[in-house]
Amino acid sequence: MKNTSILYIGILIFGIAAPFVFPAFKVQLSILCVLIVLATTWNIQGGEMGYNSFGNILFYGLGMYLCASVQVGMFFPLAEWTESGGEKTFVHTPAQFFQGMAVGLIVAAIVPTIVAGLIGYSILGLRGHYFAICTLGLGVAAGEISGGIEIIGAGQGFTTPPFPDVGSLDSRGEFFYFLSFFTLVLTFIAVRSIYSTRFKLILNAIRDNEDKAEAMGIETMKYKIIGWMISAFFCGLAGGIMGGLVGYIDSTDVAFDGREMGVFMVLMAILGGKGTLWGPIIGATVFHIFKEGFWTFFLGWQYVALGVLIVVIVIYFPEGIMGWLREKYPERFGEVVDEKDRKAQVELK
Amino acid sequence: MISVQACLDGILLGILFALIAYGMALQWGVMNIINIAQGDLVILGGYIAYFMYLYGIHPAWGVIVAPVIMYFVGIAIYKLVINKVVDRDLFISILATFGISILFMQLMNFAFGADVVLANSDYGTTMLFNNNVVLPNSKIFSAFISILFAICLVIYMKKSKLGRAIRATAQNARAAKILGVDTEKVYAATFGINAALCGVAGALISITFTIHPYMGLPYTIRSFMIVIVAGLGNLPGVAMSGMGLGVFEEFADYILGTEFRIGSVFLLLVLILIYRRFKLSKKREYLK
């Protein structure tokens, strides 16, 4: 117990100090935070619930577009903004920028949650590979359709408001870093508290055998939808932050990028270990370091490397880092049983 | 007249889709694997025909060359990847083939460039109804060849020894194994035949339409959609739903505009799945 609290405090201190210690990696660290959020929330329904979705990118892209549109639309006409493209005909004052960002992030979190609830009712009735392919279709359809809508930039893209000049030199990096780090902490606390409740056991029951779970009197549909909505909430938030961080939104290359982000989140969760709390976090960190460290060596061959990586991980390493550790050192990394329960059982023996 | 044009275009296009879907249904039924890389195999077959065209050979010969090459590509994919995921979790096989799909996409992008290309067959066009309906002869040719290949394959599956072994494995792999069928070989052959069918379809697509390294995924989704509408092992159903999809797509193209064409295909998939789900949930069942 003591060890884990030391670990948390250590990570927290590292997280707060990181942008000042490694000022050159601010953007990379913010992207890492977003990736961890995406992998962790994918794990809620992919790992714990057993509903492997390729479509969480839908909420991510939706959040991205919504946050940017609200941020612009609150103060300026949206259509004229996108028409002017990169030429800055309108300039946000700092107050407008931060107000817009705050409202935009709230909208970016709430609307995808509602969307997840609405489509979840119809889609979560599908199982296994039908669900996977259906969500894959949803993600691609969203990308294709948003690429045809004029008001959010259609094919030419959407430039998000540039960060206002507030004096200090690199406040943009720090702002986005702390925003994403805060989201990460929020996500971690939320997911950790979810995983210690009965709700997680219900999700696991759905994963292990949905028919039996239903027969035991669990309203599986309700819990599946709630699980997906939690996922969608944080995905939308992460998308909103990422939109501001990247500064430019394109329908198929940035927002609904099923070929990159949509696969990354699945891959990171599997690499770290599906169905564990720390797995996606470790997986995302390892993946991001690998990606940033070695991507430059491949020079254009990144996607080839990505394809090979997916095949290799899936075939030879499907249990992930945490799964492997659990098998190797069960006494250290195994499933933690409630201490009181365990003692009671020992006494009975 | 525009609706007649769209209908005819759609039907000729749909026959091609049905050929791809037939391959998918075959390996889905036999190996219980959904191959996301199906569309990329199609595009690869298309590039074979395109390269023959570049080197001065008539691209129609691609219909014979592409399946032969693609058969061996399919066997190679099976030996390298698929045989390790055959009896694993379905999601594992989906993700593995997704990886293959990304790999193929990029390799084709490097090898052939990111341009939209087509192999010109010089077949001319046919005018119908007082020149109001224009049908390129290449489309008619491709529909004819697809039907021919489908018929050959059906006869082959019915009569030949390998065909019988494939059908036996599809029904019950364990029983087939006990009765002396080398299921490993059957799986490899099935995947090879599937890839060969994709090769034929790809060669035809490169003649009639255009090909591009990133255009694979829509073909996968279309064939998946056709198979779930028709059901596994229902050949007339595959043909009918293929044509239906083709007509739907042409109409979506005319009504919504070309930029929404792919989007509408993917949306249709989602709608079909949702429809099936609600219909089955009345009987307390789900799609298996």
Image (cartoon, rainbow, N blue to C red):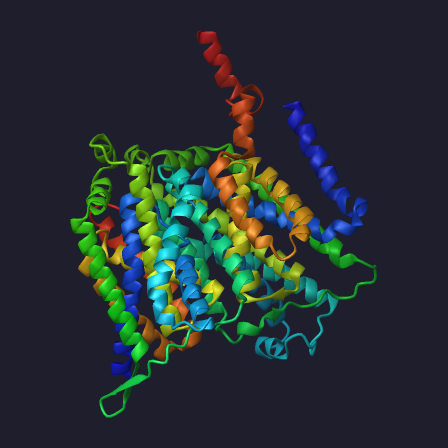
**Above or below, A179 relative to A271:** below
Relative depth, front residue between A312 and A37: A312
Q: Residue at x 46, y 13 (%)?
A: A345
Q: Residue A184 at what x, y percent from top left?
A: 62, 45
**From where the camera sits, is residue A285 visible?**
yes
Which quarter shows the C terminus of chain A?
Answer: top left
Q: Is residue B48 left or right of residue A122?
A: right
Question: Residue at the bottom extreme?
Answer: B130
Q: Quadrant of residue B237?
A: bottom left
Q: How many marks?
A: 0
Image height of B179 relative to A241, above or below: above
Of B150 and A138, the residue lying toward us: B150
Report the side of A260 relative to A248 (left or right).
left
Q: Residue furthest left?
A: B159
In percent of width and height, residue B113 lies at 54, 66
Q: Position of residue A331 (x, y in %)?
A: 55, 19
* Vertical relation: B253 (above or below) B35: below
Q: Nearer the viewer, residue B213 or B283?
A: B213
Q: Residue visible at 51% across and 17% down?
A: A340
